[in-house]
Image (cartoon, rainbow, N blue to C red):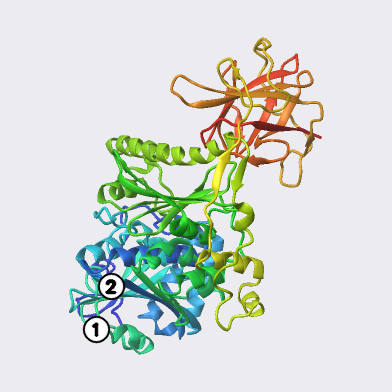
Amino acid sequence: MPSKEISKKNNGHRNDTPTSPGWIFGNLGGGMASGPNAGPTVEFRGNPSYYIAREALQNIMDAKVPNSDEPVKAEFEVKTVKAGFLPDAKYLEKVFRACAKYLDEKGSHDTANDYKKAAKKLKDNEPIKFLRISDRNTSGMTDENWFRFAESVGFSNKESGSGGSFGLGKGAYYVSSAFLTLFISSVYNESGYRFAGKSIISTFELDGERKQNNGTYGVGDQQAILEKEMVPKNIKSAFPEVFDRTEQGTDFLIPDFIGDDTWSEELVKAILRYFWLPIHQNKLVVNVNKKTILDSSNLEKLLMRYFANEDTSWSDSDTPNPLPLYDAYQNGDKIRKDLNILGPVDFYLLVKEGYPKRIAYIRKPGMMVSAKRKSTMNSFSAVLICENPKGNELLRGMENQEHNEWKWQNAKTIEKQEKAKKAYEELTKFVNSQIQKINESNEQGYMRLEGLEDFITMESEEGHGEGETEEELKKETGDIRTAEYYKELFTTSKTKDLRIVPQPVSGTEDEGGEAVYGGEGRGDGPTPPNPDPGERRKGIVDEEGELKVSPIKNLKFESFASEDSNGNTQHFIYLKGDSNKVITKLEVLIGTDDQSDKIDISKAEYSDTKDPLNVKGGVIKDIGLNSKGERKIQLIFEAPGKYSLKCKGYENR
């Protein structure tokens, strides 16, 4: 049913009565105008599959029917439908043209062009892609869920176990639409029903009135339609699977979906990266485009199919390879610790060559929040899981809007920040203590593995599988060696216990702490006088503005480690080179000349003046030697421990 035109009598609403559904954009009045970088959508621009997977599945898992033993089920499907099938498409076209005009006047021409393109698609009734997201075994859009998702900004669910909670992460739905619009159809409380369209665009001017940037397709004062009979026939005929359903749950329709032809594959990979744990636990089942079903029965097969050929020591934390994490969860050592503030947590740790040296952090309902790297000599993979209510509430309060970090500074009040800081420090101390055990194994020197000769000649009880040749396996995974390696993780193999026999290391105690040798060994000369601060000098730069550097040949160093009064390990580096030399970059590694590894530096400063130095990863920048060509640096590493250091100095050329 077409809506009535705007009239000043009803404050700019298109509805005179609740029986005439239409688009509703309230007058701005004395409020502030909103441009293209305002609202809850900004943080979620980028990869639509990444954000939709994380935000939609968190919300779906939060809405699980209480006390149900069945998994929640999610379905993602793209269907092409004419743009004119949108409810009141002609009025929405008018709104988009008004947005374009307003933004052009304000100088936001690129965004204005996007609105012009959207308006043209509606005018010409072009075919557009709709992304449908459906869920089952969920509570649907109850009053509370509806308020947080459709009627408010900045609210999230109060339940401590919640993940997305229908609140702050909803911007991901809107930015997945080139129209910044979505439609919601939900069955709740067994027989209750809601339908509405939502749009978060920019401020615009229409019929002499400036309008708010958020609007609703509904009735009355931005209210949802409560009877299916009032939903426009066009959209009902285009999506019978949505509007014919009677089962409790929710369907989202995202018009003009921005995903490209690889969207389904990218979505599957994103789900596997961040939701492998609830899938493994049979808490979540996902159907992608009616082609790929992700459940506990085929999780390992899908992990191998999509990630067996990817680097296990990934460098980009946004594209993790979940196989090492899954391997740690399945085959690693499990440590349960009841922390004083957070309560019980489970830590899974697996030391294995080539693994990413990362720890996956997970809380209820099971999405991986982040995977942080820790610097150690041994490669490893680890998973930390906190599912108890008290810990979940605290960790949830530390999350940012994108749900991809825990920082105590994210807590909302000073009181909560104080508690969050203590909880974060407690968690960090526990994790570091477990990683320290890996570091300590290196301080024992080399290790001899008894029984290794017998072990490496044993064959697996299983071959490639019935009817599966090496060529077939290679065709599926791309690399027979990599595929076989991962297949071994998930099959029963004959193994033999290996006993690690530490070999002694010779060394002496040095003043102030335990000696850890690197460079030429530490001498006991006097502390250099306080030099002039080293300043960054102008020099030759590359195309990206970075200084071009070359190795410093005559730079010498000595290092040792000691503990401060609080028991924290700190390292010192004595540098010796040319008078007043500026070391553009000093790369600090741990290990020996034969074997070394990168390590992240938490803090570095001059020992005498305590002036801070510029640090990035394992590199210290712009160190100024004094007139004697000397300098003493004090530094703390992200991963605690006493290390043998190796330094490489570079200067501008």
From this view, report whether residue 5 is shown above or below residue 587.
Answer: below
Pointers 1 and 2 in contact (C-beta within 8 Å)? no
Question: Could you tell me the amino acid type at mark 1?
Answer: Thr
From this view, report whether residue 608 is shown above or below residue 196.
Answer: above
Query: Who is closer to the viewer here, 523 or 153?
Result: 523
In the picture, measured across the screen, residue 616 lies left or right of residue 54, that is right
Residue 74 lies, in percent from the top left, at 37, 74
Q: CA separation, marks 1 and 2?
A: 19 Å
Where, by quadrant of the figure, is residue 403 drawn? Answer: bottom left
Query: Who is closer to the viewer here, 279 or 351?
Result: 351
Q: Residue at x 33, y 50 (%)?
A: 396
Q: Dot 2 lies on which element?
A: loop
Question: Could you tell me the amino acid type at mark 2?
Answer: Glu
From this view, report whether residue 104 is shown above or below residue 625.
Answer: below
Where, by quadrant of the figure, is residue 293 drawn? Answer: bottom left
Residue 42 visible in the snapshot: no
Residue 147 lies, in percent from the top left, at 24, 63
Query: Who is closer to the viewer here, 220 or 557?
Result: 557
Which residue was labeled with disc 2?
70
Which residue was labeled with disc 1?
246
Q: Residue at x 22, y 75 (%)?
A: 16
Residue 374 lies, in percent from the top left, at 53, 43
Q: Mark 1, residues whose alpha carbon is within 10 Å: few (<14), some, or many (≥20)? A: some
Q: Dot 1 lies on which element?
A: loop
Figure quadrant of the C terminus: top right
From this view, report whether residue 306 is shown above or below residue 130.
Answer: above
